[in-house]
Image (spheres, rainbow, N blue to C red):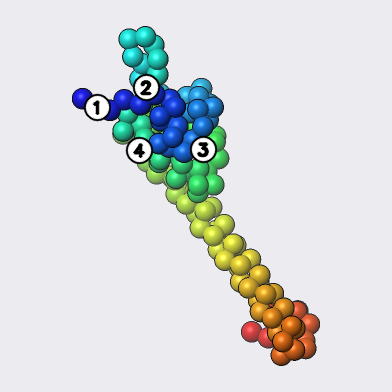
């Protein structure tokens, strides 16, 4: 028999609040099964699905894009090209954000190095000059 988790247990397993799980259900991102008393329950499959949704969210994918993906997925394999295109767009945007973050981190690291040089008196130039010496 497959393990069944209450919403509270599922919340702990996924790291999400019960409020968030109910919101995801309302938005049709997840569809828990119901027992004979109409109480929702979740399975291992649901844990994996929510994990994937969290990865999508972690890429910066918008809620509307996630809803679109879920809707396409529910329509079956004929939507694989559309799902792939959507994921390609999100991937490209995510890679661009990572590159921007890398550049920001580089400038931040240079500023810290410049401060270290100012404190130990090994740097006398302005930050702009220091940054542009590369």
Q: Answer with left or right where residue 121 lies relative to residue 24.
A: right
Comes first in the chain, label 4 or label 3: 4
Which residue is tagged 2? Answer: 41
In which quadrant will I find the C terminus? bottom right
Q: Position of residue 42 (x, y in %)?
A: 36, 26
**Residue closest to the eye, 19 or 23:** 19
> Residue at image x 54%, y 36%?
63
* Discs 2/4, front: 2
Element class at badge 3 = helix
Eyeballing the image, is 117 above or below 29?
Answer: below
Q: Marks 4/3: CA distance? A: 19 Å
Which residue is tagged 3? Answer: 65
In the rendered structure, are the residues bearing label 2 and label 3 in contact, judged by CB atoms less than 8 Å apart? no
Task: Characterize the local packing of mark 3: few (<14), some (14-19) or many (20 or more) Cα atoms within 10 angstroms.
Answer: some
* Discs 4/3, front: 4
Mark number, residue 16: none
Q: Answer with left or right where residue 2 lies relative to residue 35.
A: left
């Amino acid at each position: 028999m497959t393990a069944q988790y209450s919403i509270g247990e599922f919340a702990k397993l996924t790291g999400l609040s019960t409020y968030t799980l109910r919101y995801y259900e309302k938005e049709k991102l997840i569809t828990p099964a119901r027992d004979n008393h109409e109480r929702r329950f979740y399975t291992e499959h649901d844990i994996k699905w929510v994990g994937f949704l969290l990865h999508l969210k972690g890429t910066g994918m918008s809620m509307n894009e996630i809803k679109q993906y879920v809707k396409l997925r529910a329509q079956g394999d004929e939507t694989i090209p559309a799902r792939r295109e959507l994921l390609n767009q999100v991937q490209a945007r995510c890679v661009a954000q990572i590159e921007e973050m890398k550049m920001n981190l580089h400038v931040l690291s240079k500023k810290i190095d410049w401060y270290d040089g100012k404190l130990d008196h090994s740097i006398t130039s302005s930050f702009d000059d220091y940054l542009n010496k590369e």
